[in-house]
Image (cartoon, rainbow, N blue to C red):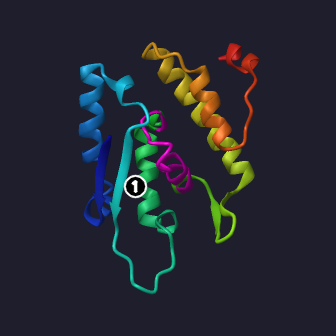
């Protein structure tokens, strides 16, 4: 498991150095596939005691993740889905509401655009790295309630 520690200084400076160091090392070693779904973020961003916002609702934190996604659009490949990292990552990028009973409720149109964007980005990236990805991509889309037909992958 890999954990990237983020603090307010890194987030406010839009500094991707901690993740860039890890990802660049994995790419150089050619070991990126062995780290599939093993990345977590430990985010330490101070909030006032009476601030009810979740981290994805804080503009500075969201902006850092938007920059991260622009640099590494294929990053969901590394995120630890079981620990909720894919869900949190998505919440950083997709408009949503938090409901105490129902959890995260994403804007449906925004989620559909996000899922398709990730499907295209990951498919291309996996092909470039010789990774068989159709089953992985189907599993990812299913996490968000989408069923992708096998015929769709022939278009890619």
The x and y percentages for residue 156 are 65, 17
Q: Which residues are magenta?
A: 76-91
> In the image, is 41 to the left or to the right of 18?
right
The residue depicted at 48 percent of the width and 36 percent of the height is 73
Q: Could you tell me which quadrant the N terminus lies in?
A: top left
The x and y percentages for residue 16 are 30, 47
The x and y percentages for residue 78 are 42, 35
The residue depicted at 46 percent of the width and 65 percent of the height is 55
Q: Which residue is mark 1?
A: 64
Quadrant of the rendered structure where residue 38 is?
top left
Q: In the depicted view, which residue is nearer to us: 99 or 96?
A: 99
The residue depicted at 67 percent of the width and 42 percent of the height is 113
Q: Is residue 56 above or below residue 124?
A: below
The x and y percentages for residue 98 are 63, 67
- Element under label 1? helix
Q: Residues within 10 Å of mark 1 (few under 14, many from 20)?
A: many
The residue depicted at 30 percent of the width and 47 percent of the height is 3
Quadrant of the rendered structure where residue 97 is?
bottom right
> In the image, is 120 to the left or to the right of 9?
right
Q: Is residue 78 magenta?
A: yes
Q: Residue furthest bottom?
A: 50
Number of numbered discs? 1
> In the image, is 24 to the left or to the right of 143?
left
Q: Is residue 50 magenta?
A: no
């Amino acid at each position: 498991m890999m954990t990237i520690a983020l603090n307010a200084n890194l987030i406010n400076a839009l500094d991707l150095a901690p993740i860039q160091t890890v990802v660049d090392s994995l790419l150089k070693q050619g070991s990126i596939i062995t780290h599939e779904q093993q990345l977590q973020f430990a985010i330490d961003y101070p909030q006032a005691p009476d601030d009810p916002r979740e981290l994805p609702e804080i503009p500075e934190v969201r902006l850092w993740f938007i920059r991260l996604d622009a640099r590494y659009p294929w990053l969901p490949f590394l995120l630890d889905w079981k620990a909720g990292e894919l869900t949190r990552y998505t919440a950083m990028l997709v408009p949503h509401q938090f409901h105490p009973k129902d959890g995260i409720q994403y804007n449906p149109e925004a989620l559909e655009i996000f899922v398709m964007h990730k499907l295209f980005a990951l498919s291309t990236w996996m092909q470039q790295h010789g990774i068989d990805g159709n089953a992985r991509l189907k599993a990812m889309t299913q996490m968000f309630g989408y069923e992708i037909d096998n015929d769709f992958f022939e278009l890619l």
